[in-house]
């Protein structure tokens, strides 16, 4: 994804906590001389420092939310990384419930995308329904949220940060998050 975005003219900052993935991207960056690609071996949860606040026009949050233990906090961090007027593009595994629910899988098993009856070991945590994803995005500050219905266990949503707004702090796992 980072290579494609770079090829389309974007300045890309790739955040990835799995070292082998960031090393692979760094190798490709150097091999192809990609000058507008920065690789950062960080967890999303590390993106709370000043350098990340109000820094980006677009946050591509693809294939992430079901891998984090605190999806609300992770979305708030993405919100804070955007400039006012910025947009967050979310793509995720999703369940098909019409209610705002999160399926808990935990890291001991997840479903094979090609055969939902087959479970494999992995590191999925919570699988949101589209109503849950939409509500979480709104609760962290995104506006004008548009979401697609879940199709073949995948869904997408777009939300804008029109301006920075505070978040309800009661019950937050990290109460100091901006």
Image (spheres, grey):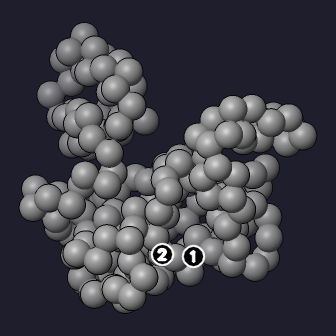
Query: Residue 130 at x, y = what percent?
Result: 67, 70
CA gap, disc 1 and disc 2: 5 Å
Classify residue 42 as left or right of residue 99.
left
- Eyeballing the image, is 151 above or below 136? above
Are the residues tagged 1 and 2 within 8 Å (C-beta)? yes
- The residue shown at (72%, 41%) is 110
Determine which residue is flagged by label 1: 134
Query: Residue 164 at x, y = what percent?
Result: 24, 82
Quarter occupied by residue 116: top right
SS assignment at label 1: helix
The quarter of the rendered structure image containing the N terminus is top left
- The residue shown at (63%, 74%) is 132
- Eyeballing the image, is 83 above or below 114? below
Classify residue 124 as left or right of residue 60.
right
The quarter of the rendered structure image containing the C terminus is bottom left
**Is residue 32 at all visible to an observer of this figure?**
no
The one nearer the camera, 45 or 154, is: 45
Determine which residue is flagged by label 2: 137
Quarter occupied by residue 18: top left
SS assignment at label 2: helix
**Is residue 61 at all visible to an observer of this figure?**
yes
Quarter occupied by residue 108: top right
The one nearer the camera, 75 or 68, is: 68
């Amino acid at each position: 994804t980072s290579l494609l975005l770079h090829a389309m003219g974007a300045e890309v900052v790739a955040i990835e906590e799995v070292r082998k993935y960031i090393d692979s991207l760094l190798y490709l960056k150097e091999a192809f001389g990609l000058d507008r690609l920065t690789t950062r071996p960080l967890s999303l949860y590390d993106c709370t420092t000043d350098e990340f606040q109000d820094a980006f026009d677009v946050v591509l949050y693809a294939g992430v939310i079901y891998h984090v233990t605190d999806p609300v906090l992770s979305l708030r961090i993405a919100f804070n990384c955007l400039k006012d007027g910025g947009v967050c593009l979310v793509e995720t595994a999703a369940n098909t419930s019409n209610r705002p629910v999160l399926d808990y899988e935990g890291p001991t098993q997840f479903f094979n995308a090609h055969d939902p009856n087959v479970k494999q070991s992995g590191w999925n945590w919570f699988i949101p329904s589209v109503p849950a994803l939409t509500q979480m995005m709104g609760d962290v500050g995104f506006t004008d949220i548009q979401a697609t219905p879940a199709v073949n266990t995948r869904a997408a949503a777009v939300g804008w940060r029109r301006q920075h707004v505070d978040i309800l702090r009661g019950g937050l796992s990290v109460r100091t998050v901006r």
